Image (cartoon, coloured by chain):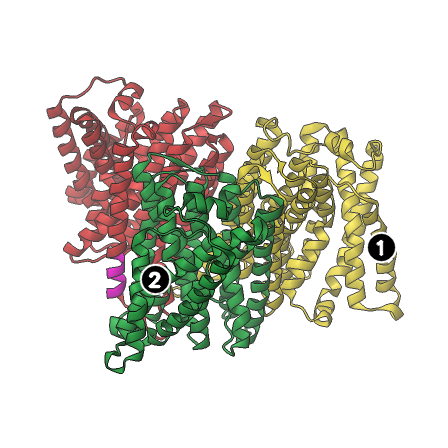
Chain colours: A green, B red, C yellow
Amino acid sequence: MLKTFKPSVDWLLVFVPVAFLLEYVPAWHNPTALFICAGLAIIPLAGIMGRATEHLSEHLGQGIGGLLNATFGNAAELIIALMALHKGLIGVVKASITGSIIGNILLVLGAALTAGGLKYSEQRFNRTAMHTSTTSLMMAAIGLLVPTVFHYSGVGVTGDTWKPEVAQKLSLGIAGVLFLTYVFTLAFSLVTHKDLVSGKTHSASDAQSHSPSGEPPWSKAKGIVVLLVATLFVAWLSEFLVSSVESARAQLGVTEVFIGVIVVAIIGNAAEHSTAVWMAAKDKMDLSMGIAVGSSLQIALFVAPILVFTSWFLGHPMDLEFTIPELAAVIIAVLIVTEISRDGKTNWLEGVQLLSVYLILAILFYFLPGGH
Amino acid sequence: MLKTFKPSVDWLLVFVPVAFLLEYVPAWHNPTALFICAGLAIIPLAGIMGRATEHLSEHLGQGIGGLLNATFGNAAELIIALMALHKGLIGVVKASITGSIIGNILLVLGAALTAGGLKYSEQRFNRTAMHTSTTSLMMAAIGLLVPTVFHYSGVGVTGDTWKPEVAQKLSLGIAGVLFLTYVFTLAFSLVTHKDLVSGKTHSASDAQSHSPSGEPPWSKAKGIVVLLVATLFVAWLSEFLVSSVESARAQLGVTEVFIGVIVVAIIGNAAEHSTAVWMAAKDKMDLSMGIAVGSSLQIALFVAPILVFTSWFLGHPMDLEFTIPELAAVIIAVLIVTEISRDGKTNWLEGVQLLSVYLILAILFYFLPGGH
Amino acid sequence: MLKTFKPSVDWLLVFVPVAFLLEYVPAWHNPTALFICAGLAIIPLAGIMGRATEHLSEHLGQGIGGLLNATFGNAAELIIALMALHKGLIGVVKASITGSIIGNILLVLGAALTAGGLKYSEQRFNRTAMHTSTTSLMMAAIGLLVPTVFHYSGVGVTGDTWKPEVAQKLSLGIAGVLFLTYVFTLAFSLVTHKDLVSGKTHSASDAQSHSPSGEPPWSKAKGIVVLLVATLFVAWLSEFLVSSVESARAQLGVTEVFIGVIVVAIIGNAAEHSTAVWMAAKDKMDLSMGIAVGSSLQIALFVAPILVFTSWFLGHPMDLEFTIPELAAVIIAVLIVTEISRDGKTNWLEGVQLLSVYLILAILFYFLPGGH
C-alpha cells in the first residue's frame, strides 16, 4: 500500500522514546500512559514501513513489487496481532481484525469521500476495479460468517453439541480457502488483468509521483535497512501496547472488544487513513478507494488466515468464529460500501453516510458488555 | 410529499362525522366500528394535510418549502404514533414504524410499478437520485438493526445480562445519528446537490402542474387554516383509533403487531399510495418512486428518532429495538428495493415482485403469535 | 432448459444395468454401491429427459414449448425429491432443495465462468435478463427465510410457543405466493417481455443450433416415447437411490444434510452443469448463465412449492422451514451472484470466487453435526 505522509504524522515519532522511558524507568511506570504512547508511536512507524516497502517495490519490478506491497501493507497490524496472540489475547486479536476491516471501509473511506466531496461536487472512480474488490470483500464476509453460523446451528436445532475442535478444523479449512482467494486475487490484479485494475495497484511509480514530499527514490540498501529497523521498533512497541492493554482497558473503563475494534484498529490503520484522505482531496479517487478497500481485503484474506495458521504453532489456537456484533459490523460495512461504490461516483453525503455507520457501530461496541 | 387526490379518496371524509357519532353517542358505541371509521376518516385528512403543506411550501420558497414538506409529509403517522405512545402502546408504535417503512417500499411502490408497467412496457427513472435514497434506507435499516444485535449479543455469549437502561442509551445515541443523517440528506438534496435530485424533490410547482384537479394555488392564510384544522381532526381521530385498537384487535382476532404493521401503516400511507400509483400511471416515475421511497426514509430517519426523543418526556421511554420479524421485514424490503432500482428501469414484473414480498410478509405477521 | 451433451456424460448410461443388478441380484446387494451407481445412472437420464423436452418443445411452438421446458427442466430433481418425500425423508428433501439452489448458482455458474474466463479475458452477458432473474432469486430466498424467522421469533420473545400446524399453514401460504411468482415470471419472459429476455429463453432452435452433436430434430412421437421411458427409469433409479441413502450415509460417514445438499444436488444438476460449462467455453454467456440461474429459480419457485403441496397428499406434510446453515447458504449464494452479475461482465476471478464460496459452504455442511 502506498503510504505518503503529511508532516504532522511523522511528528508522532517523539512518542517512541517516551514509550521506552515509560516502560523502562520504574518510577514512571503507568500502563495507561504506556498504552497511549506506544499506540501513538506505532502510527508513524507503520507509515515508514509502508514507505520503505514502496521504495523497495520499485527496485523489484512491478510483479514482485506489487506482491511485496500486498504482503507488507498491513505488517504493523499483523505484528500487533501476533504479539496479542502470543499472550493469548484472542478476543483482542479477533476484535482488531473486525476493527481493521470496518475501520478501513467506514472510517478511512468515509473520511476520504467526505474530504474529497467538500472540494468536488462529484468524484469518479474506476467501477470495474472496485467491483472486483467489493466481490472479494463479500467473499471475506462470507468466510467470517460461516463459523458463527456453524456455532449457532450446532446448538439447539440438533441434539449434538457444538465442539470447539470441530469449529477449529472448520476455521482452518475456511482460512485456507480465504488465503487461496487472496492468491487468486493477486494473480488477477498483478498478472492476468493488470491493465483492468491499473487504477488500483497504486504501483511504486504512482506513489512516487503523488508523493507530497516528492522525495527521490531510496537505494535498495536504504529500503531494506529502514524496513528492518522500523519493523523491529513496531514489534517492540507492540509488545508494550499489548502488555499494557489490560490495565489501560480497566483504567479507561472500556471493554476489551472496544479496545480491539476501535482503538487498536485506528492505530494500525492511521497511515492508510492519512494517505487515503490526502489522495481523495487531490481527486485521485482510484488510489484513495484502492487503499481503503484494499487494506480491508488484505486484513480479511491475508492477515486473518495467517493468524489462524500461526495460532496453532503459538499454542493458542484461534478459530474464525466472531461474536454476533463483530459479524454484523463486518456484514453491514461490506453491504454499505458495495452499495455506495456501485455507480462509480461519490459525493460528500456518501462519505458522511459511511462515517455515520461507523459512529453507530462505535456506539454499539462502546455499550456492549465485555468479553469475547 | 406531494399529495394529489383522485375524487374517490376525498369521499372518505363522510367517515369523519360517523366516527364522532360512534364515539360520542353512547348507544352507538362499538370499538371495532369506531376503529374502522376513524381509520377511514384519517385517510383523506392526511391527504388534505399534505395538500395544505404543498400550497404553503409554494409561498415559502424552494428551500424552506422543501423543508416543510420533508417535515410534515408524514405528520399523520407521527400524530397517530404520538397518541399511541401517550397510551404506552409501544408495541403498536414500533410495529407501525416497521409497517410504514415496508408499506411504502413494497405495497405503495409495488402497486405503482405494477400500475405503470401495465401501461408502459418499460419505465425509466433517475438512477442517481434513487441511489442516494436507497443508501440512506440501508443506513436506516442498519440503525434499526443495531439495538437488536445488541440485545441478542448481550445474552448468552457473555456472562453479563442485557440491561434495558443500556439499551435505552444505545437507542438514544442511534436515534441521534439517524436524525443527523436526515439533516445531512436534506442539506444534500435541498442545498448542495439540488439539481442532481431535482426529479425527486417534487417541489410545489411540480405538484401543481401534475395535479389532476389542476386547482389554483391557495393563499397563505388558507393554507395555514386548512393545515391547522386538518391536523386537529387527525389528532382527534387518532385518539379514537388508538383508544379502540385493543378492543378492535381482540374482536377481529388479529395480533397487536398485525394491526401496527399492516392496518395502521396502510391508513397512514394511503395518501402516498394513491399519489404514487397515479404518478406511475402517468409515467412520472421519478415523482412516484420519490414519494414512496422518500416517505419510508422520512419514517426511519425523522419520525422514528422524534418518537424516541419524545417518548422520554411522555414517561414511556421507547428504544429502537425491534422484534426479529420486524427487523427481517425492514431488511428484506430495503434489499429488494435496492436490487430493483439498480438499473434505472422498471417493469410490471418488478411491481408484482414487490407486492409478492409484501404479501409474504403480511402472511408472516398474520400468523405471528401476539405481543411485542 | 437446454441439455446438450458431450459424449462423456452419455457413457454413464452403463450404470443403469449395474444399478439394476445391484438391486435385484441378492448376492450383489450393497447399499453404498447401489447409491453410487443409481446416482451416476440418473445423470445421463436427466440429460436425455432434458433433450427430449427440448425436441418436443420445438413441435409445440415457442409459448407452450417454453412452458414445457420450464416445467420439465428439473424433472429429475422433482422425481428424486418426491421419492424421498414418500419415504418421509423430509430432511433430505429440504437439503436437496438448498443444494440444488446453491449448486446451480455457485458450482455450475462458478465452473462456467472459470471455464469461459480461461479462454476469454472478459465475457459479456445481457444484464437486463439477469437482473430479472436475480430479483426473482432474491424473492425466493425471502420466501425460504420467512418460515425460519417465524420459528425463531415465536420462541423466546413471546410467551406463546411456536406451533408446527401454524408453521405449516404459513409455509403453504408462502409456497402459494412463490408459485404465483413463478407463473408471473413465465408470463413476463414468455409473453409480455419475450424480446427483452430472448438471450435467456434458450428456445429449442437455439438449443439445436448450439448443439455440439448437431443432431436433427426428433419426431413428436420419438420425443414423447423417449421422455416417458427416461422418466420411468429416473423414477425407478430414484427409488434405489432413496432406499439406499440411509445405509450409504452411515457407511460413508457423512450426515444426511451433506448427502442432500452436496451429493443429491450434484447428481440432479449434472446435466445443467455440463451444458452451462460448454456454453461458457463457447462464449455464449447468456445461455450459460440462463441455464444455471434459471435452474436455481425453477427449484425455488416451482419445485419447492410443488413439493410442499404434494407433501400434504403423501401424508408427510413438509413445511418451508430450513435450518440456519441451509438458509445462510441460500442467502449467501443469492447475494454473491447478484453482486457478480451486476456489471454485465464476467472474468475467471468471478468464477473462482463463486467456486470458493461453494467450497466454504461444502466444508460447513461436511462438519455440521447431523440431522434436520
Mark 2 — residue?
A262
Marks 2 and 1 sit apart, C-alpha to C-alpha, by 61 Å
Looking at the rendered structure, the kind of residue marked 1 is Val
Q: Position of residue B2 (x, y in %)?
A: 28, 29
Mark 1 — residue?
C16
How packed mark 2 is, by other alpha carbons closer than 10 Å (few <14, some 14-19, many 20 or more), is many
Task: Name the secondary structure under disc 1.
Answer: helix
Residue B262 in sight from this viewpoint: no
Q: Does the magenta stretch mainly form a helix, a strand or a loop?
A: helix
Task: Name the secondary structure under disc 2.
Answer: helix
Question: Image height check: is B3 above or below C53?
Answer: above
Q: Position of residue A75 (x, y in %)?
A: 46, 62
Q: Position of residue A304 (x, y in %)?
A: 50, 64
Report whether B273 appears left or right of B313: right
Q: Nearer the viewer, residue A278 or A165?
A: A278
At 44% from the left edge and 43% from the top edge, which residue is drawn? Answer: A209
Instruction: Name the subunit of mark 1.
Output: C
Q: Which residues are magenta?
A: B165-171
